[in-house]
Amino acid sequence: GLVWHRDIYENDGRSDHPVVNLCVGSSCLFGFNHNENDPERVVKLNSGDVLLFGGPCRLIRHSVLEVLLEECPAWMKESPVRFSFTFRDSPEVLGREAEFKYFRVKQHLVGQEDFAVPTDPKTFRGLPSVATQSNSRK
């Protein structure tokens, strides 16, 4: 799975344009809510499902709670995996791709606990990259 987080970093895009996520392979249980105190909602995502985070949900809190390896397309039965393809509008990082080459949850998923959803998400500019992302290989 993937820990609870929000897509709030500079490489997640600074605009209010939506984030699009395509799920391919094994199913997963995907949790989401707007704030930590809100009830958690859970949906099952299957291969081919698409998520769209936009508008007031652009900075939604979310997590991959469980990957269901046994629930996968027939063509993947021998070696089931789950792929998650995420598409974001983040032109600010063009030419700076090396800064975001490596991402390790324990090292780089920082600032989540102190984040407050802005009243106007259109003005949110993202948290800056962590310097170690460009050379972290562990």
Image (spheres, rainbow, N blue to C red):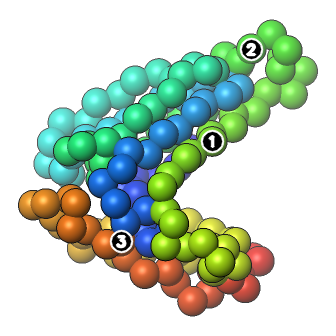
Q: Nearer the viewer, mark 3 or mark 2?
A: 3
Which callout, 1 or 2, points at the residue further toward the start of the chain?
A: 2
From the viewer's perspective, is 45 left or right of 61? Answer: right
Please state the horizontal and vertical placement of residue 28, each as a whole percent of the image: 55, 29
From the viewer's perspective, is 54 left or right of 67? Answer: left
Please state the horizontal and vertical placement of residue 83, each as a whole percent of the image: 69, 37
Residue drawn at (24%, 73%) of the image:
114
Q: Quadrant of the C terminus?
A: bottom right
Element assignment for label 2: loop
**In terms of image quadrants, where is residue 122?**
bottom left
Q: Residues within 10 Å of mark 2 (few under 14, many from 20)?
A: some
Would residue 61 be seen by someone viewing this image from the given angle?
Answer: no
- Residue denoted by label 1: 85
Nearer to the camera, 27 or 23: 23
- Residue denoted by label 3: 126
3D distance between C-alphas at marks 3 and 2: 36 Å
Is 12 placed above or below 1 here?
below
Is 116 placed above or below 29 here?
below
Residue drawn at (24%, 43%) of the image:
55
From the viewer's perspective, is 136 left or right of 76? Answer: left
> What is the three-letter code of the residue carrying label 3?
Gly
> What is the three-letter code of the residue carrying label 2?
Pro
Which callout, 3 or 2, points at the residue further toward the start of the chain?
A: 2
- Residue denoted by label 2: 73
Please state the horizontal and vertical placement of residue 127, each as a whole percent of the image: 37, 76
Which callout, 3 or 1, points at the residue further toward the start of the chain?
A: 1
Residue drawn at (75%, 33%) of the image:
81
Is 48 placed above or below 9 here?
above
